[in-house]
Image (spheres, grey):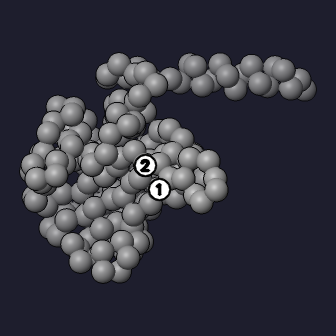
Amino acid sequence: MLSIKKLALAAIMATVISARPFQQKRDDSYFTLTVINSCSYDQSVGIYKINTDYTTTEIMSMTNIPSGTTSNFSAPYYEVGLRLATNQDQFLAQDLFEFGYSQYTPAGGSTIEGTAYDISMFAGTTEGMRATPANTNCPTKTCTSSSCAKDQAWTDANDYELGSPADTTCYYGKTDFTVEFCPQV
């Protein structure tokens, strides 16, 4: 029978052994985006910032992720208006993981911070996407190519008229995310 100390040590070692290297330097101002390509074809992704004039600025250049593989990326935690996308043109058909820093101070309370996030699926996309925060207190968003509820992703620019149900904020500080293209449900 394993003692609690041995079990704890085994758990720590398993985490260290399974750790993957990051493609960019990580410090306290970054979090990890783990991208899983479950599609039957290679996927190229980049991170872009959407500016107030709706132009885009490249934050991380396009990186190819072969079919059936996973890659880790460092994403800036304190930025807003960011997206993990398959191309820089924000108006082309594509699935997006959109994210950015958020903080909130309730009346009479302490300021809390975290990441606001959502999935956007433009008309004409066929892949689907899943965004899973590492903090299990925060909801996972999932859309497949055949099914996408309004509380799971933006599918139309008029979704704001519904109160933007896909928008979510994880107010548990900095947390990593796993984003999967072509998720299997």
Residue 10 position, x and y percent, is: 72, 22
Q: Which residue is mark 1?
A: 169
Residue 22 placement, left or right of 157: right
Task: Determine which residue is flagged by label 2.
Answer: 102
- Indicate the amino acid at tag 1: Thr
Q: Nearer the viewer, residue 120 or 164?
A: 164
Spatial CA span between label 2 and label 1: 8 Å
Label 1: state its secondary structure.
Answer: strand
Taking the image as drawn, is residue 40 in sight? yes
Q: Which residue lies at the image location 38% right of the left edge and 37% below the top edge?
A: 78
Horizontally, residue 94 falls left or right of residue 176, namely left
Secondary structure found at label 2: strand
- Tell me the quarter of the image containing the N terminus: top right
* Residue 7 picture location, percent across and down: 79, 25
Task: State if disc 1 and disc 2 touch (CB < 8 Å).
Answer: yes
Mark 2 residue crowding within 10 angstroms, few (<14) / some (14–19) / many (20+): some
